[in-house]
Image (cartoon, helix red, strand yellow):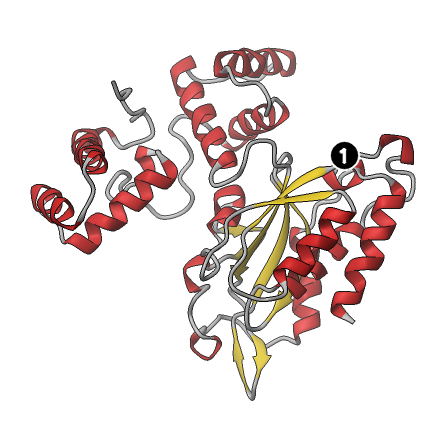
Amino acid sequence: MVPSPDLSLVDPDRRTEIARKIEVVENFLKEPGRRSAEAHAAELGIGVTQFYRLVRVWSERKAPEALAGAIRRRGGYRHPKGLDDAQLALVRGTEAGMADEPILERVLNRIYQHAATMGAALPSRPTVRAALAAARRHRLQGLPAGAGLAIDHCVVDMRVPWKGTDTMPIATLLLDLEHRAVIGLALDPVGGTPTSTAAALLDGLKRIGETAASDAKAVALPIAIDRDGDIGWPDLFARLDRHGLIRSGRDLKTMPRGTRTTDLLGKDLKDVRFRPRAIHTPPEKRRGSGGVIDLRAAEEHLRSKLIVISDDAPLSRLSRSMRHALYDDLSTLIR
């Protein structure tokens, strides 16, 4: 028996319709195929293309609030109902710190313990639990279990020079999933590549202090990296593997849209606006806002806004010798 979906983050007046959509999609998944898709799309009163999009979103996320029509669009960022910024930060921080704890009730108890210690008030337990469940879904979305690092490529709303005109560049971001932070980045006017990935990793490695991790603490770290058909990926992955970064991720025809970044950080962060839907738009058609800025200056601007330096960043858990060898090896890819 399929468990009932958690509709707590869906607008109350939309829950019946969203539950119906999920039921129809689940019925289709039992007997997939073109004719079945046409019949189930007709049942919902939508086209087949829209129905396949609904199936994809539900299959990938299993989050009712991610389905079209689940949340009435409002201006600005929408917090889970009943939580302010500080309360939401407490929920997300506690969840990330207990990433290996599979029982949410134990994480929930810890959240209330932290709140009591801080003298902070929290809304009702069901409200906090719904926010906790959403935080865990968003953190783990599309990631293999145990991954603490990920690479993502996302368009940034700014303008850099490109072939006599200008374009919105693509940022390759090294993401610290435990702390929900950017710890390295590289900027390219065209797209995310093995070279930009190596550059983002080098940027992150440069920020690890010499005192972090001795050779006695050498570990291997999982890193989630999706790849497209670029022939440079196998060489990059071999170099990472040699020095303690174990790659997992999807092999795709084209790069995903950069929703890993927006799921982790939101679409707007410290006056930086991410545009994930523009990832497959040709450079000449990506029109950004603001004045044109040199690529390297734009890169440094983004670093000043986005980079978070932490003594406990995942890369610091590699031994010093592994980090140095990895840095030297990756440097040869961007010279």
Asked if residue 268 shows in the view, the reply is yes
**In-image side of 39 versus 266 (left or right):** left
Vertical position of residue 106 compared to residue 54: above or below: above
Vertical position of residue 104 compared to residue 135: above or below: above
Q: Nearer the viewer, residue 295 or 121?
A: 295
* Percent of width and height locating residue 143: 52, 39
Residue at (40%, 25%) from the top-left corner? 82
Q: Nearer the viewer, residue 219 or 158?
A: 219
Q: Counting other residues with Cα less than 10 Å from the Cα at mark 1, is it few (<14), some (14-19), or many (20 or more)?
A: few
Check disc 1 and report the residue beneath it.
312
* Percent of width and height locating residue 59: 33, 39
* Percent of width and height locating residue 286: 45, 73
Asked if residue 73 shows in the view, the reply is no
Figure quadrant of the N terminus:
top left
* Percent of width and height locating residue 188: 61, 69
Figure quadrant of the C terminus:
bottom right
Q: Nearer the viewer, residue 22 or 75?
A: 22
Q: At label 1, which amino acid type do we have?
A: Asp
Vertical position of residue 262 compared to residue 137: above or below: below
Residue at (54%, 46%) from the top-left corner? 249
Q: Nearer the viewer, residue 102 or 135?
A: 102
Residue at (57%, 63%) from the top-left corner? 192
Residue at (88%, 42%) from the top-left corner? 320
Element class at badge 1 = loop
**In-image side of 167 versus 28 (left or right):** right
Q: How many marks?
A: 1
